[in-house]
Amino acid sequence: MKINKRECRKYADPGFTFKKNDGLLLIENINHIVRTAIKNISGKRVLILYFYERERAADNAAPEYILFQCRDDYITLQKFEDGTEKWLSASLENLGEHYAYFHKTCAFYRKKDDERVTRFCKRSYTDSFTALDSLQKYIMQTRLKERIKKRERKIIERMQSVPPVPRALKGWIHREILPHYIYYIYKRSKKPMQGYCTACRHDILVSGVKHCGKGKCPRCGKSVTFKANGRTKRIFDRITVQVLERINETELLLRIFKITNKIRDCRDPKLYTWENARFFIRWDETGSANISPYYYSYNRGMFTKWHEGERPHFPKYQYNYECDVCGYLYCDNINNALAGTPWQYSQLEQFHRIDGEPLEVIPYIRAYNRYPAIEYLVKFGLFKLVSQIVYRYDCPKVINKDGKNLRETLGIGPEDLPLLQKINVNAYEFLLYNELKNQGVRLDEQFFTWCRQRDISSNENLLIALKYSTPGKLMRYIDEKFELLKNWINRHGVCRYKEPNNILSDYKDYLLMGVKLGYDFTDSFVLFPKNLPEAHDLASILIDVKKKEIYNKQIQEAYKGLLEQYRFTKNGLTLIPPKTAKEIVVEGHFLHHCVNSYVERVAEGKCVILFIRETSDIEKPFYTLEIHNGQIVQIQGKHHCKPTPKVKKFLELWKNKKLLPAYRAEAA
């Protein structure tokens, strides 16, 4: 029960007086003189301490502080010289200007005042201030416990709905998840060696095996690692397992278990299992998943070790096993857990069983809420496409969340599905497939396999090249030129074509410049130049600079917006957009590459060209960057040299700070 402040005011001025010749008033080390009284206030026995300023006490001034102390509460009334008052909840040691030293500059007026405080506090201290401080700390600790109890009571009530752990979980972990070993007694002879399998826990005979080699147990057929006795001192395996359970028809519980397996004696492994996190997943009225995370604290908590929120993690970008929520999914109960809930048809189990590798369940559930069509994609076997939609925040938009069928959802027909299933298409390949289909280009499995093997990452390069060539001819031409030019060093000592992507990029530029120059691409000799670098550079020279001046106005209009959106300075480098068409032309001439052919596309907004400059010499060209659809298409230095480690690090910082946020804002 709290102290009644209104009743306490009646005892704020007791009318105590001091003798002017009292020796206590002359001690300079004392700031306050204390007098006491015990009163019955609102049915409670209250100890009252009056703190008088020593210098004003002789003038019979009112006390500066009046401390009202009960057995379970305390409060202080402070009076100012202008007559105003203020209630304080601070303890004794925190009163006054000098915190934690206030009571050390106080003295009791009489011994009776000192003894009264000691008797009231009932503490085994000879010093009454220490006894009073001990009582107040006890009250503060009691208040803290009550606050913690109130907060943790909600968590305890929340945890009452948690069902028991599946009985088969531990056996499933041993059979399906933990790595298995065969320990064998090594012998030089070719005779079978005595061994022990940790999977089936039986003695077996093995032959022709090597220490740390991979194989299968001849008895149970499990994949195992062979370990020679005497060469293996200790094995320590640790994994994460997720168990999904149903609370009710609109709420799920995801439980994170940590498992460690310590093997010193192969016949007596030490398997430890503990639960370290829980995620309550509730379907709210808006149709989205509302996640309430809890984590288990091993050294904090009075009534429960469970705490609301995600586990604290420092440093943020360093791996922490306890914070890792990516793990193997226990599938034996998943159909029953999801039955009757909004996630009943999410195909989570089928998605996990693709490779049986660890995954995060929460992003999948959230993605399913946004894109229910994920159900059909998993059924169709488009697992790479689903994986990118679920786990890549920068994944391009490839599906219509409101689609009712295959054509509305993906924009394809049943005739397209067999090829997409066969290649297990990802998001970027799917976009390429749709765009090439609209161009009338017929694709097959060989083309996509070729792109993956050569790491062809730019859809734009392929789209432009396939306007004038068939996939088969393009693949043969790029492969042929790469074999000829992969070790070619230009006169500036730069290897210009380190990857097939570089060949394709220059070929695309050659085609775009050739269109402006009126090249006849119906002639295969013109379409597939024998000497690509020479043809590319010649076309760049032939582009008339004067024609590009008409785009100055458009580029200047876009300059301010691009400057605000992409400008970035860090580590001595600065990234800026061009102001005029002439700047782009000068950039290409100074760095000896073909960016001057991009003026028209930049002016029309089809691509964005940016300049990387050294901050100390901002006017001098250094590196040129092209971005398209939120991706870096290419970066070229002088004579097509590749970026230095310093420039790569700068670009990575810029991409995270500027490019990705800008792309997500545009996509939204």
Image (cartoon, rainbow, N blue to C red):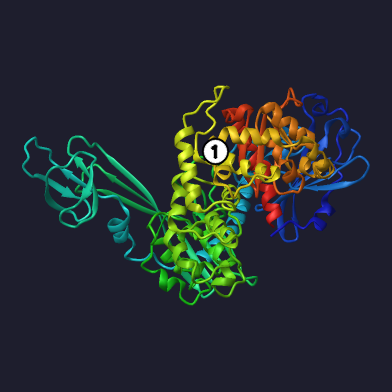
> Considering only vertical position in the picture, is 426 above or below 57?
below
Q: Residue at x 61, y 67 (%)?
A: 400
- In this rendering, the count of numbered labels is 1
Does dot 1 land on a helix, a strand or a loop?
A: helix
Of the 4 image quadrants, the one containing the C terminus is bottom right
Residue 433 falls in image quadrant: bottom right
Residue 441 falls in image quadrant: bottom right
> Which amino acid, by three-letter code, is at mark 1?
Asn
Left or right of residue 598: residue 471 = left
Left or right of residue 399: residue 547 = right
> Considering only vertical position in the picture, is 441 above or below 136?
below
Q: Residue at x 84, y 41 (%)?
A: 63
Of the 4 image quadrants, the one containing the N terminus is bottom right
Residue 203 shows up from this direction? yes
Give the farthest residue toward the bottom: 340
List x then y, in percent, for residue 470.
52, 53
Residue designated by label 1 = 502
> Considering only vertical position in the picture, is 162 above or below 95?
below
> In the depicted view, which residue is nearer to us: 55 or 25?
55
